[in-house]
Image: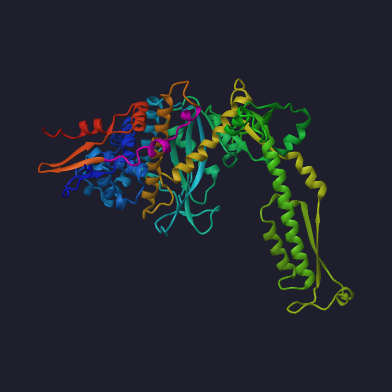
Amino acid sequence: MSINWFASATRDDSCQLGSLAVIAPILQQMDVAAIIDRHLPADPQAEFPWGSVLSLLVAARLSHPVALMNVADWAHHAGADLLWNIPAEKLNDDRLGRALDHFYNQRHSILASIALHVSQTFNVSLERLHYDPTHILLHGDYPASQPRQNPAPDLHCSDAADPPAHITFGHSVKNIKMIHAGLSVAIDDLGPVPIFTHAIDGNQNGHTAISEQFDLLQEFIPLRRLLMASDRGTFSAGHVARCHRQGFAVLCSAPWNDYQGLYDEHREQLRWQRASYLSLEQQRRRRCESSLPLEHYELAVLYHQLIDPEIGEEIPCRVIFVYSTADAKIEQATREKTVAKLATGLEAIARSVREGRRNTDPVSIARRVTKLFGKRSAARFFRWEMHPLTAEEQAALPRPARGCRRPTHRFVFHYDTEAAQADTAYDGLSVLVTTEARTESADSLFSQFKQQNEVELSHHQWKTPLAVHPVFLKKPRRVEALVHLLLIALTAYYLIQRVYRQRLDPEAPEAEKHTTTETILRAFQEYTLRIEYRREGRVFSANVLSARQREIFLRLGFPTPAQVLSRTLPHYPP
C-alpha cells in the first residue's frame, strides 16, 4: 500500500522566523524600544513609535543584515512585521532613514540608558571597561561631511548639536574613506558585553578616541569606580592623568620604546615571577600532556611616577614588565627571516649597480633601499653607501652587457651583527602601566588585561555577522547613527550567550560553558512558522521545536515562538 499521496495545491505557506525566535526576546529584556521612546519625542504624524522601528532595524541586522531598502521584504518573509506589529510595506527606507535621524540626536544618552539597564538586569559590572578603537570603511564621496571644529565634544551641548564624525581618508588604509569608532566593553568570566561607543574623524588617532569616549562616559554614565584598560595605541601620560584626576584607574599597554630606558636602568634589580595566566590553548596542552611547546609569561613590577602634563603633579603608578616565552621565539624567528630578506634585497641592488642597469644612480638607489626597508625594525642593523668609482676603476671594469652602461658607483652595505645580537635581549618583552591600587596584584591585573583580546573579537563580530562594514548611506548623520545603533545589536548579540552561560550547571562540560551566540542562532536557522490562508485572513502557527531548540529556550528562559504568537495575535476561533 502506498504511503505517498498527491493532492491539489493549497494556499498554505510559511515564513522563515529563524533566529528572530531568540533575538526578539533578548531585545525585549533589554527594553530597547521603551528606552528609545523615552528619549525621542513622539511625532504626532508618525504612525509607529521610533522605538519600535529602530528596535526592528536592530533585529534585522542581527538576523539577516540587508540594506535599508530591503528591510521591508525581509520583515515580510521573516515574520518581523508580526512580532513588532508594523506592516512590512510601512518599513520603507525613508521611514527607517528618518528614524536614524531622530536616533542621532540622542544616540549617546540612549546607549548610556541601555547600558545601565543591561548592567542591572543582566548583572554586568561597569567597574572595569576595556577600550579599543577600530576603523569602519565607507564608499562614496560624502561631500557634506566636514571636519569637526572642536575635536573634543562639548559636554554641555546635546547630541544633536555635535556634528557627525568626518568621513575622510585615514592613515592606515589608503584611498578609502573611513571613520573610527571605539568600543567600551565590560568583561568578566562569562565573556564580554559591549556597552558604549563613539565615532571620531577618519584621520584621528587613538589618543583622541579614548579622550572623547572617556569624557562621554563620565557625562552619560554615573561611574563611582572605573578601571579603564586599553592598548598602547591609546596610551599617553595625558590619558593616565585625565583618569587619575577623576579618581579612576588605568591599565594600559605602553609602547616599549617609551620604557626601554627605564628597563635598562633597573634591569638588574627586577624580580621576575611566573604569571598564573595561561591561554586556553596552553591550558589544553597541559591537561592533555601535549608534546607541543609549553609557553608561559613572567612578570616584574617597578614602582614609578608619571607627570601630569597639564598641572605637573606626580602620579604614582606601577610599571609591569612582561616576558613571553612564545613571543620571544616568534620575534627571534621574525628577525632572522627579515634580516635574510633584507640581505637578499641589498645583494640584488648591489648586483644591479655593479652591472650598470637602469635606475642605479644614487637618488634611485636611495629610493629602492627605502622601499626595501619599509618599517621593518631589523633595517636599523644595516648600513649602506654608494661609493663613486675613480676613472681608473671604471676603466678596469668589463664591458657592460647589452642594455646596461658602465657603472659610476659601487653599492656597499654592512650588517651590524653585534647590534642585532644585543637586540635579542629585548625579545618577548612588553610593558603595562597601571594606577590601580596596590591591593590588586600585578598577576591579577595581567590576567584582566589579557581579556583585552575579547574586544578584538567584538570588533570582528561587529563587522561580520552584524555587517557594520561596509556602510552604504548618503548622509554622515545617518552613517554615525547606524554605527551607534549597531552597538545595541552587538550588546544583544553577546547577552544571548551570557544568559545561556549564566544558567548552566556548574558541572556542565567545558565546551558547553563556552557556547557562543553564533552557535545558538545557527540552531534556529531553518525554523519556520506555518501560515494558513483563510477567509478571515492569515492564520499563523508555530512548528514543533527540535530537542536542541527546546533545550536552548529552557536555558535562556525565553518564551517560545508559540507563546510569543499567542500573546501577540488574537486566537483563531475553533
Q: Is residue 144 left or right of residue 80?
A: right
Quarter of the image holding residue 207? Answer: top right
Q: Is residue 425 above or below residue 349?
A: above
Taking the spot 41% from the left edge, 57% from the top edge, the residue there is: 142
396 part of magenta stretch: no
Residue 76, position in %: x, y? 25, 46
| Residue that lies at the very extreme toward the front in this rendered image | 1
Q: Is residue 326 left or right of residue 211?
A: right
Per the rendered image, the range of residues in magenta is 510-528
Q: If the image is split into quadrants, where does the C terminus sit?
A: top left
Q: Nearer the viewer, residue 561 or 81?
A: 561
Residue 35, position in %: x, y? 31, 33
Q: Is residue 409 above or below residue 291?
A: below
Residue 570, position in %: x, y? 15, 34
Mark yes or no: residue 158 visible.
no
Taking the spot 20% from the left edge, 43% from the top edge, the residue there is: 47
Quarter of the image holding residue 409? Answer: bottom right
Quarter of the image holding residue 266? Answer: top right
Residue 432, position in %: x, y? 63, 33
